[in-house]
Amino acid sequence: MQNSPAKAKLYNPSAIPTILKTARERALKPERRTKRWLTEHLGISERRLTGIEEGTSQIHLDECIEWCEAVEDPEALEQIMHIYGIGLPPTDPRLLESVSDQLDNLKPEIEEAFQAAKQIEQLSQRWRPWKGFKEHDQQLVESTAKQIFDIKHAAECLLSAMEKEWGLNKQHVEATWINGAISNDIVMRSVSDYEKLRRERTDQERLAQLGGIK
């Protein structure tokens, strides 16, 4: 039987106070390094801010996000999100200083991902829901999935390098992508639309289950 490893986390939640304090102290805009500015921006007391940085006051994820965005520190936010189990740990910043280096990294990943896509296509032809995969095919599923994951990470690194070296506005690119995705019916316009679809699908699944009960 194959082991199911726990989700890997590099950072401990106890590091959050240090991450947030360091993010404030290294903010590029001098006024944002001050406790006074940040407390006014976040709408909290200086006593609570000090408690958060010293680890004696709790802070929620949404407050962490607002804190990191206020001091304009995306790397700190990546660390926080990883601690909460939402994202990957941030890439070593020394690897993100050159667009050409990241492009050289992305190109072979694209080629390997293309080969992985061919293998996934072959796997899909062998897949039988009522039988599952044999051990060899299951290992192939995981190895091809890792390669797809590699290209996702390589693409993110290239975008980050373009942001750091060329001043790319990633937020603008993201907004443009979202608008295009809405136009092409790739994403849904609202939470209510999304939840309506989920309810419909859930009802269909429940009916299917009831139909299968003898």
Image (cartoon, grey):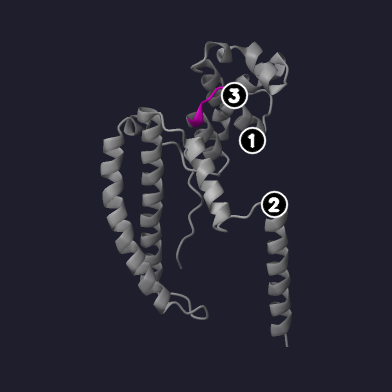
What residue occupies the far front of the structure in this picture? 183
Query: Is residue 141 something one can see in this rendering?
Result: yes
Location of residue 68 (image quadrant) = top right
Q: Is residue 95 left or right of residue 55?
A: left
Q: Residue at x 51, y 78 (%)?
A: 129
- Counting residues from the N terminus, which is met first, the one under dot 3 or under dot 2? 3
Q: Position of residue 205 (x, y in %)?
A: 68, 73
- Tell me where residue 118 sits by quadrant: bottom left
Q: How far from the left and from the top, in percent, is residue 186?
A: 55, 57
SS at mark 1 in the image: helix
Span colored in magenta: 70-74
Residue that mark 2 sits on:
191
Pointer 1: residues within 10 angstroms few (<14), some, or many (20+)? few
Disc with the residue nearer the chain's start (1 vs 3): 1
User: Of 211 and 172, which appears nearest the observer?
Assistant: 172
Residue count near mark 3 (Cα–Cα under 10 Å), binned few <14, some 14–19, many ≥20? some
Residue type indicated by callout 3: Ala
- In the rendered view, would you say 207 is above or below 46? below
Q: Which amino acid is tagged 2?
A: Val
Q: Is residue 64 above or below residue 209?
A: above
Q: Is residue 72 magenta-colored?
A: yes
Residue at image location 54% in from the left, 29% down from the top: 15
Q: CA distance from mark 1 to mark 3?
A: 14 Å
Q: Position of residue 210 (x, y in %)?
A: 74, 80
Local SS, label 2:
helix
Which of discs 1 and 3 lies nearer the camera? The answer is 3
The residue singled out by tag 3 in the image is 70
Which residue of the protein is positioned furthest toward the bottom in this rendering?
214
The label on residue 61 is 1
Q: Residue at x 57, y 30 (%)?
A: 14
The quarter of the image holding the C terminus is: bottom right
